[in-house]
Image (cartoon, helix red, strand yellow):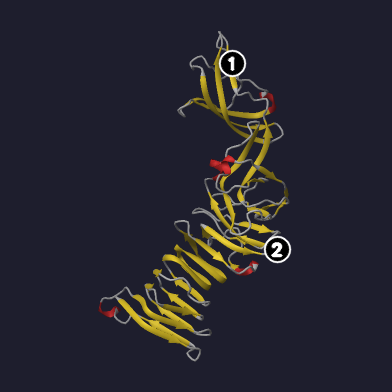
């Protein structure tokens, strides 16, 4: 059933109004839709409780400077932007889908117990966002933008097992010398990001991306990095591309558990082409209960957790094979506690695998050409290493 409201004007003298539309449920109607076709005004100090499955706002006047409680809402659509400076309080025990281009509102409170808020729309929040219950999923590159520069403008569970966070692009207005936490993550787990000691007031957007460690290639063949495969963060600025700040990355794995190892911060100043740019390893001051904290300021770009940086200049990138087909892919394996080696041909087919490499790769059945190898090991001092590189087989007569 669809209920069309021509015009509603609520002043302060009306302290509370309940719009309740299940009156026809006894005759078989169980779904209710509210559509505003003309105008609706809710004054500051006024509360409105709307019990409806759907809400659709057309192009005409709508302004709410009070509090709108949306109970049991499932679907909302908006075709205009400015909705007033009031509070939208979403209450549901299932998923809520919101469609449109862009909306501006004062505050948003999400209390979706047992469901998620799916936003296929840009949402500008002037005052505060409170995440009581329910994850927020931003679809099709839409964003939530917090206009208030207070660090407390987002209210959320700050514990490591938080399940009510944002998946997608979260933009916050930040001020100088303040600390801002971004409660973001992936479909699997919570992966917050923190910014502090900004040198400029700015709007900083942060999103979590599970593919960053896999896309990130080392720009120095003599340096190999072990990036934690949990994912990474893309950070961009709406105003100051050259703004500098301290970044803190959460130490939470893909299952939502604390990462026990001591990780550093890997950084590129290009959030789009990060895998093609020079990387900078940021130094670390300390690890707290949730974050690994940098003491070196970085810019916007891409960030990830890196476990170790080691230099392996002594591992060759070529096997020179003489007439006896002797393997020349040798290095000081006695420095390692263990070594695992896999070699692939130019088509990506695995041609060699060893869980305990001992300089015994035999090239007699392989022609000259370019191959690729993946080496994983641990030095005697406990430092771990992973190296992906090119391997040339060169036959001489």
Q: Residue furthest bottom?
A: 13
The residue carrying mark 2 is: 176
Q: Is residue 82 above or below residue 237?
A: below
* Eye-nearest disc, 2 or 1: 2
Q: Residue furthest left?
A: 27
Is disc 2 placed on a helix, strand or loop?
A: loop
Is disc 1 placed on a helix, strand or loop?
A: strand
Quarter-of-image position of residue 308: top right
Q: Is residue 377 above or below residue 366?
A: below
Between the C-alphas of marks 2 and 1, the distance is 58 Å
Identity of the residue drawn at 55% across and 58% down: 184
Marks 2 and 1, the one that precedes in the sequence: 2
Mark 2 Cα within 10 Å, few/some/many (few <14, many 20+)?
A: some
Q: Is residue 278 above or below residue 317?
A: below
Q: Position of residue 352 (x, y in %)?
A: 51, 24
Q: Is residue 251 above or below residue 347?
A: below
Quarter that holds the C terminus: top right
Locate residue 5 relative to residue 268 in the image: left or right. Answer: left
Quarter-of-image position of residue 289: bottom right
Q: Nearer the viewer, residue 184 or 149?
A: 149
Q: Position of residue 387 (x, y in %)?
A: 60, 32
Q: Nearer the viewer, residue 227 or 65?
A: 65
Q: Position of residue 104 (x, y in %)?
A: 50, 71
The residue carrying mark 1 is: 320
Q: Nearer the viewer, residue 117 or 92?
A: 117
Mark 1 Cα within 10 Å, few/some/many (few <14, many 20+)?
A: some
Q: Nearer the viewer, residue 25 or 86?
A: 86
Identity of the residue drawn at 58% across and 60% down: 183
Quarter that holds the N terminus: bottom left
Q: Position of residue 13 (x, y in %)?
A: 49, 91
Q: Confirm or deny contact between disc 2 and disc 1 (CB under 8 A).
A: no
């Amino acid at each position: 059933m669809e209920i069309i409201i021509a015009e509603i004007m609520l002043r302060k003298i009306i302290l509370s109004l309940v719009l309740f539309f299940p009156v026809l449920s006894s005759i078989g109607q169980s779904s209710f839709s509210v559509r505003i076709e003309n105008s609706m005004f809710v004054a500051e100090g006024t509360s409105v409780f709307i019990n409806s499955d759907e809400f659709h706002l057309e192009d005409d006047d709508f302004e709410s400077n009070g509090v709108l409680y949306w109970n049991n809402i499932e679907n909302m659509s908006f075709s205009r932007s400015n909705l007033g400076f009031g509070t939208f309080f979403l209450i549901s025990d299932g998923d809520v889908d919101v469609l449109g281009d862009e909306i501006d509102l004062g505050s948003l409170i999400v209390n979706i117990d047992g469901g998620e808020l799916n936003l296929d729309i840009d949402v500008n929040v002037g005052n505060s966002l409170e995440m009581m219950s329910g994850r927020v999923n931003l679809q099709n590159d839409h964003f939530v933008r917090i206009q208030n520069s207070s660090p407390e403008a987002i209210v959320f569970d700050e514990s490591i097992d938080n399940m009510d966070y944002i998946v997608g692009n979260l933009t916050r207005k930040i001020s100088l010398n303040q600390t801002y936490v971004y409660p973001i993550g992936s479909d699997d787990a919570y992966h917050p990001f923190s910014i502090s000691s900004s040198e400029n007031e700015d709007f900083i957007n942060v999103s979590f991306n599970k593919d960053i460690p896999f896309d990130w290639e080392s720009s120095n063949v003599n340096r190999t990095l072990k990036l934690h495969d949990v994912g990474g963060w893309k950070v961009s600025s709406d105003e100051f591309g050259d703004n500098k700040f301290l970044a803190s990355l959460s130490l939470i794995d893909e299952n939502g558990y604390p990462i026990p190892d001591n990780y550093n911060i890997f950084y590129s100043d290009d959030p789009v082409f990060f895998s093609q740019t020079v990387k900078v390893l940021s130094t670390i001051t300390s690890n707290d209960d949730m974050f690994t904290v940098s003491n070196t300021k970085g810019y916007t770009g891409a960030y990830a957790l890196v476990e170790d940086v080691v230099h392996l200049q002594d591992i060759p990138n070529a096997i020179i094979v003489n007439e006896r087909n002797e393997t020349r892919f040798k290095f000081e394996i006695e420095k390692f506690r263990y070594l695992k080696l896999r070699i692939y041909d130019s088509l990506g087919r695995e041609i060699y695998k060893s869980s305990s490499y001992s300089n015994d790769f035999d090239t007699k059945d392989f022609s000259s050409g370019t191959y690729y190898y993946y080496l994983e090991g641990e030095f005697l001092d406990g430092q771990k290493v992973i190296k992906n590189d090119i391997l040339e087989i060169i036959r001489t007569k």
